[in-house]
Image (tube, rainbow, N blue to C red):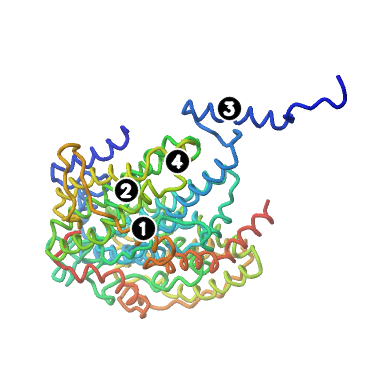
Amino acid sequence: MTATAPAAPAVSPADAVERQLQEQFDATIAAQHRIEPRDWMPEGYRRTLIRQIAQHAHSEIIGMQPEGDWLLAAPSLRRKAILLAKVQDEAGHGMYLYSAAETLGADRADLTDKLIEGRQKYSSIFNYPTLTYADVGVIGWLVDGAAICNQVPLCRSSYGPYARAMIRVCKEESFHQRQGYELLMTMMHGTGEQRAMVQDAVDRWWWPSLMMFGPPDTDSPNSARSMAWGIKRHSNDELRQRFVDMTVPQAEFLGVTLPDPDLSLDPATGRYRFGPIDWEELKRVISGQGPCNAERIARRRAARDDNAWVTEAATAYAEKNS
Amino acid sequence: MAHEETVYDALDLAHGGEGQWAFGTGFDDPLAGVDTTVPDGVDPADLGAYCLMLGDDALVLAQRLTEWITAAPELEEEVALANIALDLLGQARLLLARAGAAGVLGRSRELAGPTIPDEDALACFRDPDEFRCTALVAAPNGDFGRTMVRLLVATTLRLAVLTRLRASRDPVLAALAAKGAHELTYHRDYAARWVLRLGDGTAESSRRAQAGVDDVWPLLADVFSPTDVERRLAAAGVAVDPSGTRAEVTDVLTTVLRRATLRVPPWPADEAPAGRHGRHGPELVDLLSRLQGLARQHPAATW
């Protein structure tokens, strides 16, 4: 034994602990058990989850706006009540999801700031305008329908608080979807003008709904890692195909035409083939060039800034009375 | 993927074609199964007019609160304001349907197509001068401070009326009041807590809350003045004379404002009812043009 003998590669005690924690984490994921807030997790997993959950929460909150535009003008008191309850549910979904993000160390006010400053995104679908009351029904049927396809697998997400929030969110979304479809059925049994409104809304929302599943698998950089971590369960294209297969028979029953001349049933697979999606449009909307991007963020910013004095007062009052 | 299949299986059940398969979207008639016979000795026109007064107050205040949706200070407030608006909308639907059942429909029934229920004929096909709400609920929201002060005042008044109306000889009004009083207790508590926070929060919030109080107070001028309809129905044990609620209302408002370290302005002198007789300012015309526009464009439609 001499002082000059070459040392084996050093493994510090901290590295050894980290490696053991990583192994436990990997074993939990492999066994399809859940990661809970108190558990160790890799920083990348934490960051990816915060990004995904915040984006989802932002989508719920921004998603209140397109339909909220019809709250004051709903054509009957019953429809007003249904829509108000739905928009209220979306605020509730935003609250659960921001809470889930907070279990990872994020802060709701900070996430809201990031949304307003454009540093975090929300679903591009909410950058389209709602031109008639049929849009309320079509958002329920197609947009909520696509959201359900995306979100039901997340009920089995590897992160416990997110998975549990998604169970509740999905139950309410499926209710909204049925209410939207019921509105469209009622309108299709109404006047010729109402039927034309429904078809026009379907024409405008069909392709953006397909874009909700995200870019094609060949162009989805984060998907593979998220699937390995159990944060994501199915590929974008797989979920998109599932949505088309479920929706086409519903469109036929409703009596509307989906605006895709290439749409056809493949008898060999029982699945529907559909035409090419305009990915340039999705890129434009995501990059802020959609019809309503500026308006959506401006309203969220106004709600924060115009009412900052209210939040300050509530904080001051709580401190005085604590 | 059992869950997904359940969602879409439920949609397939629609093939029965009855259109009632989404919970909460049926029940077109809010008074279905309720005996709407008018009590002995009561003029149905009076009863209908009274239902319009209470119903229009609820409808117009619900519409004002709905204006806050997507613009509220916190998500918790989005949820709470929507909840209060939904409760008031529910009260309005029952009251307007009750007015319709009592035969008080006027021209609205001729303007609205036959498929449109009474509650919507009354909400969407009456002109502003046929509305019976007070200026208190029709006034614009202003900032969150003024909105909370108006909500406190309006819910304190309405709670005082509904509490007494639980003893009405008309069983429909009595049942509605029992449920409504329970809801209003929560609404008033919500508003009072915000008035406390704002009045005793920061210098800025106190200034704004006081400005809200000063703006809202003059709207109390006609809320304690009964119409002839209210006098007759109160004498018959069916309605509540609002003058009998004055002591309770002024006591509650004074207590909350003092605890909020806000100044209680002088109570305005009583004036004859204006809104209850269909005399309104331009703010109600604006509110109704939004509320009614789409329904009026499609009088033959079914929604």
Front label number (2 vs 4): 4
Front label number (2 vs 3): 3
Front label number (4 vs 3): 4
Spot occupied by residue A193 in the image (x, y as percentages of width and height): 15, 66
Disc 2 + disc 3, Cβ < 8 Å = no
How far apart are labels 1 and 4 at the CA level? 24 Å
Q: In this image, B111 relative to A70: left or right?
A: left
Label 2 element class: helix
Mark 2, residue position: A146
Out of B68 and A3, give the one closest to the viewer: A3
Mark 1, residue position: A125
Chain at tag 4: A
Q: In this image, A319 relative to B151: left or right?
A: right
Out of A68 and B137, give the one closest to the viewer: A68
Of callouts 4 and 3, the N-terminal one: 3
How far apart are labels 2 and 3 at the CA level? 35 Å
Which label was assigned to residue A24? 3
Chain at tag 3: A
Spot occupied by residue A131 in the image (x, y as percentages of width and height): 28, 67
Of callouts 1 and 3, the N-terminal one: 3
Q: Amino acid at mark 3?
A: Gln
Placement of A246 over or under A208, stated as above or below: above
Query: Crowding near pointer 1: few (<14 within 10 Å), some, many (20+)?
Result: many
Label 3 element class: helix
How far apart are labels 1 and 3 at the CA level? 39 Å
Which label was assigned to residue A224? 4
Spot occupied by residue A262 in the image (x, y as percentages of width and height): 18, 53
Q: In this image, A37 relative to A18: left or right?
A: left
